[in-house]
Every structure is written in structure tokens, then in C-alpha cells.
Amino acid sequence: MGDIFYNNILMSTNLMDAAMRHKVKKFINPISNCTYPARLTKNFNESEWWDGPLHESVMVYGYARKASWVQSYAYKKQYDFDTINLILPNMYGPGDHFDEERSHALGALIMKFIEAKRRDKKEVVAWGTGKPIREWLYVDDGAEALVRSLDIKPFIEPVNVGVGYGVSIRELAEKIKEKTGYAGGIVFDTSKPDGAPYKTMDNTRLKEIYRWVPKTSLDEGLEKTVKWYLKNR
């Protein structure tokens, strides 16, 4: 965990500092939504970002990413360095990691269902209870948010980039089962951790500043991702 914190702090700090020293006009800083307090149980609003500690499962990485906003705030005050800080949910899509160790739940489940179908397995095991709620952002929409930021007036406060709703891991698993054509059962391994119970974000500020919201529905994004995996696995 110490390495995770050190490496993230070092990389983020040096990158922003180099941009400032080379007079970059605008720095786009992506931040994970795991930086929100663990106690929140509804769509996270930017005004609540400092309202409590992070969930233990993401605390080390989350605080390292949150520190990048503090750096952007300090650099704005001292050097008038312009930064746009975007808070993004879990992203997915073509080119993602598809394995149990490196991927988020969505990528791991796509891999599991497709391989279970190929090997004619009777069931797929998913981690946890299936109850946690997660928001998923298709990678093309995440990339578009970054590009659109180039034309946005600098705004030091964080901006949530998301679809504004979430689905349970159980519902996600059922959707992926349908998209992959798997006919077996789903078993939830409750000995595995769930992580934070809720992670979805309010996108009101995004609508107001960007006049835009992500366009790719979860069903459409899953279909594209499953097709890519089948072609490239």
C-alpha cells in the first residue's frame, strides 16, 4: 500500500509541476470517484467531497488522487496555474483489462461469462454479495469529457463526469450474462469483499458547465465491449 501511495503522489505531483514550469495553459486532472466519503448513500455531489473519510478499501489510492486537487488549488493561488479537475467513475470498454486481478467488476465479469460459455461451465462465480451500486462510464465518453475540457473556462472546483445513475453488481452480472449469451447460473461468493456500498455521482454541475452529459447507455456500451473482447481475446 505504501508503494501505491508513493508512486501515485510522485507521478501526479511531478506531472503537474512540470506542466506549470513549462507554462502549459490548461491542465486536465482526472480523479477517481473513490475520493468521495464512504458514508454517502445517494448520488455524490461535489459539495460533499470533503464531508468524511474514504472507504478503507480505496483509502490509500483515494487520498493520493485527492491530494492532486490540493496541489492544483495551491498552484492556482501561487502561480495562477489553470487546472480542470474531473471526477470520473469506473470506466470500461474496448482495450480494458479483462482478468480477476487487474480489472474492475465489469471487465472481470465479461471475461468470466465468455470463458464459462466457451468451456460449457454450469456457473459463474462473482465476488461479494452483488448488492453494491456502481456507476459505469464508457471509455469514449470519458475521453470526450477530457477533450471538451480544453474549451471550458478554468474552474478550480471538481466536476463530476458521469451518467448520474448506477446499477447493482447483481444487475450488472445479469446484463452481461444476457449480452454474452451464457445459459448457466450465477453464484455470489460472499466471502469476497464488496468494497464501498454505493458509488454514483450527481452530474448537475457537468450539465451546467459543459452543456453535455455522457451519451452511451450501459446496454450499448456492454454490447460494444463484449464484441471487442470476442474479437481480441
Image (cartoon, helix red, strand yellow):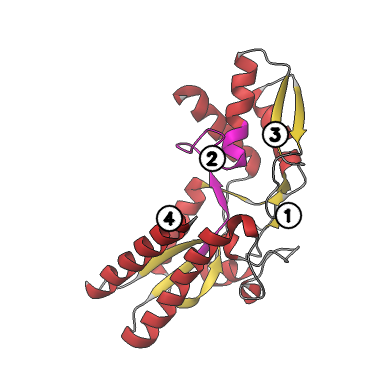
Mark drawn on residue 224: none
Residue located beneath label 4 in the image: 3
Residue shown at 53% from the left, 60% from the top: 60
Secondary structure state at the residue bearing disc 4: helix
Near mark 2 (Cα within 10 A), the count class, few <14, some 14-19 or many ≥20, is: some
Q: CA distance from mark 1 to mark 2?
A: 18 Å
- Residue 154 visible: no
- Sequence-earlier tag: 1 or 3: 3
- Residue 203: x and y in percent read 62, 64
Secondary structure state at the residue bearing disc 3: strand
Amino acid type, residue under disc 2 in the picture: Ser
Amino acid type, residue under disc 4 in the picture: Asp
- Sequence-earlier tag: 1 or 2: 2
- Sequence-earlier tag: 4 or 2: 4
Query: Disc 4 or disc 2, which is closer to the eye?
Result: 4
Q: CA distance from mark 1 to mark 3?
A: 16 Å
Residue closest to the far left: 22
Secondary structure state at the residue bearing disc 1: loop
Labels 4 & 2 near each other (Cβ < 8 A): no
- Residue 160: x and y in percent read 57, 65
- Residue 157: x and y in percent read 52, 76
- Residue 120 visible: yes
- Sequence-earlier tag: 3 or 2: 2
| Horizontal side of residue 96 vs 120, given as left or right | left
Q: CA distance from mark 1 to mark 4?
A: 26 Å
Quadrant hosting residue 7: bottom left
Residue located beneath label 1 in the image: 197
Labels 1 & 3 near each other (Cβ < 8 A): no
| Part of the protein shown in magenta | 86-109
Q: CA distance from mark 3 to mark 2?
A: 13 Å
Residue located beneath label 3 in the image: 126
